[in-house]
Every structure is written in C-alpha cells, then in structure tokens.
Image (spheres, rainbow, N blue to C red):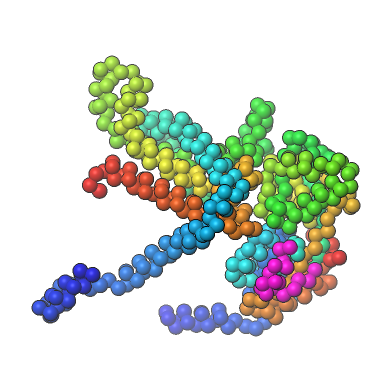
Amino acid sequence: MTRTLLFTALLLTTGSASAANLTVFAAASLTDAFTELGKAFDAKTGNKTAFQFAGSQALRTQLENGARADVYASANTAQYTPLVDQNLVAPGQAFVSNKLTVIAPRNNPRVTRLPDLAVPGVKLVIADKNVPVGDYTRRMLTAIDKSGTYGKDFSARVLKNVVSEEPNVRQVALKVQLGEADAAVVYVTDVTPALKPSVRVIALPTRFNQSARYPIGVLKGSANPEAAQAFVQYVLSPGGQQILKKWGFQAPR
Amino acid sequence: MSWGLTRKREASLEPARSAVRRPRLPVMPLLLGGVMTLFLLLPILVVLGRGLSADFLSTLLSPVVMDALRVSLWTTLTTLGLTVLFVTPVAYLLARFDFPGKAVLDTLLDLPIVLPPVVAGVGLLLTFGRNGLLGPPLELAGISLAFSPAAVVLAQLFTSAPFYLRTAKAGFMAVDREVEQAARTDGADGLRVFRFITWPLAFPFLLEGLVLTWARALGEFGATILFAGSLQGRTRTITLAIYSALESDLAPALVLSAVMVLLAFAVLLFVRGLAMRRRPGL
C-alpha cells in the first residue's frame, strides 16, 4: 500500500520532461478560442493544458494571493502590469486585439440603434468597472460624449439604464441570450456561433470603438517554464493566430 | 489538568493495576480532532482579524459597504415578512391535517434546502424570467422582475423559506391539542385559538425558524447573482458585494466578511439560547 502510494507520488512529481501539465489563466473572452488552441497545442506537444477562464481582474486577484499557474493572458494591461510590478509575471506580449459591440435579444426590438441605449427604461447590462470589458465600455461612452453626436450627457443617460454590472463578459452576454436584458456591451468575439442565433448585433462606429489589447506572459512561479514559454510561442505563432482569428480576434496592434 | 494529576498519584500507589484500568490519552482522535477544529476555526479567525483592522469604521461607512448592508437588510426583512405570511399557514396545515400525498408534499417542500442555490437561480429564471414560463403573463400585468430587488427577495424566499417551514411545523406539532380544545370549548373561534393559544405556544419554534431563515437569506449568493444580477445600491447584497470587491479593493470585502462572521455568531448564540429556554436542563 505504502509502496504503491510512494510510487504514484514519484510518478506525479517527476513525470516526463516532454509531457507537462500546464495551467493557463485566461480572460473569459478567450474561452472558445483558447479551448480550441489548447487542444491543438496539446496535440502538437503532448502536454496537458488546463484553462481557468474568468474576468481578468478575478484572475489577477487569485494570482496576487498565491494561485499556481503557468501562463496568464489578460484582456487589458491594467489587470496585467500590476503583476509585472510585483515580479509575478514576465512582461506581457500583445497577442491579439479585440473590439466592442452592442448586442440585443433577437426577439426584443427596444434597442436597434446606438442612441436607443439612452432611452429611459431600457435594461442595459455591462461588466463591472474593474473587468476589462467594463473599463473599455466606459471609455467608449466617454468617447461618444466627447464627440457630442448624441449630446454631452449621453454616457450619464446610458449608465442610468444599467441594471446589472457583471463579473465577466460571458455573464454579460448570457443576460442578453436569456432575454433578461434589452441590450449589453460585449466584445465582437463574444458573438460566437452559439450566441449568434439568439442575438442581434448593433455595430459601433469605428471612431467610438475601443481597441482591447491582450497581453500574455509566463508566470514566475511556473513549475514548467519551458512548456509555458512554448504555449506563449504557440499563441504568437501563425498556427495559434489562425485559431484566434477564426474566433474573431484581430492581430495585435 | 486534573486528569493528569489523578493519573500520576494513582500510578505511584498502584502502578501495575492503574495502567490497565485507566484509559490512555486518546492520541489519534485528539490529533485528528485538533486538526479539524483548527481547520474549521482558523479561516473564521483570520477573516475577523483582517476585517476588524484599524480602518474598520471608515470602510464600514463607505458607500460600497453601506449600500450592501442596506440592500441586504431591506431584502431579507421583506423575505421574512413574506415567509411569516405565506409559510406559517403551510406549516400549520401540514402539522394539523392529513390528506393524500401529504408525506410526498412534505418531503418535496424541503427540496430547496438540499438543492444547490445556483440551480434555484436557473429554476427561477426559467419560471419568472422574461422568456420564462410566467414571463409573458407577468409582462402583460406590467410586472418586471428582472434585475429588481424583488428578484433578490424571490431568490432568498425560495432558498430560505423551507427552514422556517420545518421549525414552524415542529412548533405546531408540539402544541398540546387539549389546550386548544379547551379554548374552543370556552367559545373561542378558530382564529382566536390560533392567535392566543397556538401561535404563542409555538412561538419559540417560529422564532428559531425565522432566525435560521434570515441567516440563510443573508448568505444567499448563487440564486441571486444569476436571477437578480448585481448592481450597487439596488440588487448587490452583502455576499455579492464581497464577491465584487474581492476583485478590486479588498478592504470592503474584508469588512463585510467580518460583519457576516459576527452576525453568524449572533445567530448561533440566539438559536442556542432559544433551545436552552425550550428544553431547560439540556
């Protein structure tokens, strides 16, 4: 019994150099793209990659409190740089960029154009201000205010319609998918094939839209720094970029 | 301490016999029990220690914390009111009357206690949500539950009312039927018997049930975040505020956690006190 246990423990600790167990902490918006990318990476390298998807701010808090992971991919620099400053992660490499969009339930006509977001009584769901997409959403609204197209108090009127501030972008999208909210602000990449049938997309003019930059890097506490670095390289490689592009992400700018 | 002394003295008098008769210190259970006790108490003490720090008061008075306390207070009080109004009759009927299928119904009504809260949230969403079973008729009636404090109350009511139902039922069953009968013989009608005999006699049970319901409602998270969303000052209860604050400024999360620990302690003391009064000598 003891011998078996010892043997198992030995196996678990040593493993083989070629097949590492990797843990990747990634922004919720990367859920579909990274899941596919991880499978391709594992098939190529023989590693076993596991993902934890959540709002970047939640992942950052977990990492600051000692969570063990090998790679961190955030949806903005604000939730990444503090970890660099604390020497928890290597400086980030931008690997994709993303755009915002407004979605509404397909069978609900209350919001069809951007100015509809400010109509009193509209139920708008956005992400919390600490969530990257929540931060980009507020920047987008400020940009609209500055342009004056819909009046200087547009963002104030829109924010009055916010009925819930969610902890990650997938929860924001879910509220529209379920038909509970009249509209929501998410990334263009969140309008996945699974979501598309139940929502309408209201495009944002380029001059208001925000460019979300995603940094990625190997964590200092990684037990498999080589394999972790290999994952980052794969994400940046043409093969990895091809998968990300397929899920609607754009090349980093 | 005294045990050790006795053992030592006896050992010196009758070394051979006492070694056989005296129970040995149960090392294994003591060790395992100690580990478990530490495991259960240490995180609570750490939360208290971190939460009740120097800037406890200033954080407590910050808008994030005050809003959460206010939302939780109003929604849980509403839940309690609805619980008393709607669950008391159910408990009374289950305690006093027999009907076909009673045992099944009795068991089914306990379901929310063992159901994962997030499942409760899904159920509420599919029933009362805009696209849910009762969504369209509710919308016609001009009632919009989505993202409202009413949704918070429904989530709390669903997950916590069964606690009151259980204790209230036990309370009504513990009331001596002969006392009620005597009052009825003296000419009191059903309502008066309930008001002046049954209710006061069952009251300690009802109170315990209410306190447990309140504690459960206060801790509600899974069903609330799914069914009611999370907006400061409107639907963001204490637990939702802790979850949200953990991801930015830790201080409000720690203070609210400490407040919850203190409240939980008060609830335990209260329920303990009630139980002691009900069963003197225990």
Q: In the displayed structure, would residue A220 be above or below residue A189?
A: below
Report which quarter residue A26 is drawn in.
Answer: bottom right
Compared to A224, does A55 lie above or below?
Answer: above
Q: Quadrant of residue B39?
A: bottom left
Residue that appears at 36% across and 45% down: B271
Please say whether residue A35 is visible from this viewpoint: no
User: Residue at image x 40%, y 40%?
Assistant: B209
The range drawn in magenta is A78-94
- Which of A175 and B41 lies nearest the eye of the viewer? B41
Q: Residue at x 75, y 37 (%)?
A: A122
Magenta span contains residue A37: no
In percent of the image, x 38 and y 31: which residue is there? Answer: B92
Q: Is residue A72 above or below residue B84?
A: below
**Image coords of residue A199 (percent x, y):** 77, 45
**Which of the two residues, A103 or B119, is positioned nearer the viewer here?**
A103
Q: Quadrant of the C terminus of chain A?
A: bottom right
Q: Looking at this rendering, what residue extends furthest in the left direction?
A: B13
In the image, is B5 to the left or to the right of A116?
A: left
Residue B62 visible from this viewpoint? yes
